[in-house]
Amino acid sequence: MVNFRSQFAYRGIILENIFNFIMRLVLMLLLWKSIYNHTEIIHGRSYEQMAQYILASSTISSFFIYPSIHFLSMDIRNGEIAYSLLKPIDFQTLFIVKDLGRTAAVAVTVIPIYTLMVLFLGAASDQGNILFAFVFTLLGILTCVSFDFVMGLICFWTENSWGITFVRQIAIQYLSGGFIPFEFLPDTISKLLRDWSPFSGIIYFPVQILTQNYPDSYILFRIVIQIFWCIIFLVIGRLLHNLASTKTVVNGG
């Protein structure tokens, strides 16, 4: 709750979130408008359906713009991480709760704009399942935050976050379907990213469930798969946390 409120303490943070979201949304819509300029259907999607996908994917993508890995790396380099590890609260839990608070603050900022854009463009979908899409979005957020914790802990060994942050951005923006739907990729790559990647549940499936019609049984199956990936990242994060704590003690701070 503290991190949620802190995001609204500075007007610049709110304006930056809004600006980044609107610019990404406008550029993506213009890009796909030009792609659909001489055709009506591409890979089974009309421009109206693509606009729905872009609106929803850009909104969810904006939830993950906070550079938590960078700040964790800074704490490791300057020694501030020692104070976090000494607190009477589990460090992994603290990191996840902080990130969830920041994500919630961004969501509160951009969702009203998303709603207005949907109404303005007439891009509302009557085929999706809002409840399941909401559940899947929450699981996607937890997956991303848990993944960020794993990547951030690697900075204990690399002591630099630039390369790790770059890898994270590729995973979240491109391997999750945030930039382009998987159907536009070659079949083998599309199937691999859609069915076997943990990142497809961060953006692609929440958007698809919101805008497309899927059987409830399939949605529940995908939810179970995403819960599995969340647990995997949490367990990996716990193991790395234990190793990192030992390394911190050995290094003397």
Image: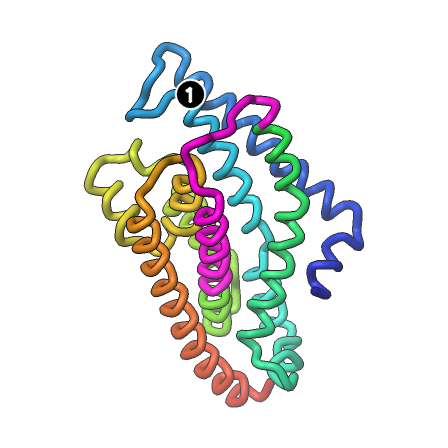
Q: Quadrant of residue 47?
A: top left
* Depth check, front residue: 95 or 60: 60
Q: Residue furthest top?
A: 38
Coloring applied to the structure:
rainbow
| Badge 1 element | helix
Residue 8 can be seen in this image: yes
Q: Is residue 184 above or below residue 86?
A: above
Quarter of the image where the N terminus is located? bottom right
The residue positioned 54% from the left and 51% from the top of the image is 64
In the rendered image of this protein, does residue 227 appear above or below residue 137? below
Q: Is residue 192 left or right of residue 51?
A: left
Looking at the rendered structure, the kind of residue marked 1 is: Tyr
Q: Magenta includes 124?
A: yes
Q: Is residue 189 magenta?
A: no
Q: Mark 1: few, some, or many residues within 10 Å (few <14, many ≥20)?
A: some
**Closer to us: 246 or 163:** 246
Would you name the residue on which mark 1 appears? 47
Q: Residue at x 44, y 82 (%)?
A: 243
Taking the spot 64% from the left edge, 86% from the top edge, the residue there is 88
User: The C terminus appears in which quarter of the rendering?
Assistant: bottom right
State the image quarter where residue 110 is shown.
Answer: top right
What x and y, as percent, mark residue 63?
57, 49
Q: Is residue 81 above or below residue 18?
A: below
Q: Would residue 178 be seen by someone viewing this image from the given angle?
A: no
Q: Is residue 66 left or right of residue 172?
A: right
Q: Main secondary structure of the magenta part?
A: helix
Q: Which residues are magenta?
A: 119-148
**Residue 34 location, x and y as percent?**
44, 16
Residue 155, position as x, y percentages in the image:
50, 68
